[in-house]
Amino acid sequence: MKPFPPPLPFKKLIGPSFVILALGLGSGEIILWPYLASNYGLGIAWGALLGITFQYFINMEIERYALIKGESVFVGINRFWKLAPLWFIFSTFAGFGLPGIIAASAKVFASIIGVGDFRWIAIAFLIVIGLILSSGRTVYGMMEKLTRTIILIGVPFVFVLALILSRGVDWWSLAQGLVGHGVDYNFLPAGIALATFLGAFAYSGAGGNLNLTQSIYIKEKGYGMGKYAQKIAGLFRHAKKEEEIKLEGYDFEINKEAEKNFSIWWKRIGIEHAIVFWFIGVLSMLLLMLLSYATTYGIPGNAQGINFVINEGLQIGKILFPWAGMLFLLVVSIMLFQTQLGVMDSTSRIMAENAALAQMKWQKKKTVHLSKIYFSFLWAQIAFGIILFLLGATEPKTLIVLGACLNAVAMFVHIGLVAILNNRHLPKVFRPVLWRKILIGLIFVFFGVFSVVVLVDQLG
């Protein structure tokens, strides 16, 4: 038993939402939604807005559990579904093991320096990611600082470009697209690949099992009962004196003070997530779609892979100055690189924690060397990506769309599991209110139906 901590000041809460937002910037925000805008116009903008709004409520339910229990949702789900560790390891590796984001980063960077075969750049980028994640004093602290810096530089840069290059008619098209009106279509244009649209929808934010790492990040940030949780240490800094980590949280006495503290925590983290994740996320997606539409819509060759990004850079260079187009491509490459870094961290955390839960159950232990397991999964993913590149699997968009469809199914599963967890395994006073239960139920059904429709479509 531990006392439920009093809420921190709002400014000290900011951080985890930057990390979870950064996980989506390189997949949905920079690649898939702008790709759709460059080929089909802005009539599909409603999907980006709806997708990230869904993810806001999904993430808040994930935060609810960690705030109250001081442990990740994986620990809670493992208590009522014994096969959960196997599912989360499999679905995470299947969804994110394909290195599409870093392939996109390398291809964009290669276009800047004039290199045709970008595989070797991608391989070098993967190794650099491994070294970065292995070198911090704590992995989370390093991730938060890095992602916050890149987002606060990259998003304003895109905003300025969008203001300079777009016209009033482009903004009007965006406004119409938010309510589903496109050029000669409503909501979905003829010929759009449902798999690509579902992938973009699932990646409106983090997507897949990555949403679940929000419970780990807020625990390590010290939200609520997470104040008492331990952190994953860097591989090089603490290799010799690594401590075993306790994954389970602590209980607290339910009284008026605890209820009051929870209420203030819940309000503040809801505002933090709304400002950082939802608002900045919506702004980023819509501006990137607007910029893509204003510069590349109607240009031949946009449908091929991620050529639309390179076309975007060329058009920006023609309209403004050549160095402006190069700078845009460099910023895109860096944001994609940072996204892959965040994805590697999150997926390694997910698989490590679930492997640790299985190991603890098998060995009947209460603690585990989580850092060692984390870095094993991290470098295993890097090795897998390198092997794929050496075998010739290099097309970024194909890898991203395939991974995104797998992750949409994973989201359908974890939305249901977290709903069960919060509605059956939390004290009644802290469970979701009725309207949140209904909303999560509708989101659960939406992802289930959409996943089946895309599967049927892909099978012909």
Image: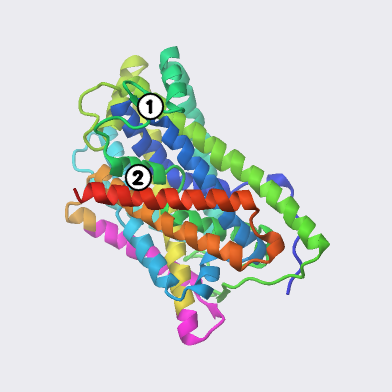
The colour scheme used to paint the residues is: rainbow
Question: In the image shown, does 204 or 191 lie closer to the viewer?
Answer: 191
Helix, strand or loop at label 1? It is helix
Name the residue type under label 1. Answer: Gly
- Dominant SS in magenta: helix
Q: Position of residue 109 (x, y in %)?
A: 31, 38
Q: Position of residue 77 (x, y in %)?
A: 51, 69
Name the residue type under label 2. Answer: Gly
Question: In the image shown, does 43 or 233 lie closer to the viewer?
Answer: 43
- Numbered range of the magenta stretch: 359-387
Q: CA distance from mark 2 to mark 1?
A: 17 Å
First in sequence: mark 2 vs mark 1: 1
Q: Residues within 10 Å of mark 1 (few under 14, many from 20)?
A: many
Dot label at residue 101: none
Determine which residue is flagged by label 2: 199
Question: In the image shown, does 33 or 188 lie closer to the viewer?
Answer: 188
Determine which residue is flagged by label 1: 43
* Figure quadrant of the N terminus: bottom right
Q: Residue furthest bottom?
A: 364
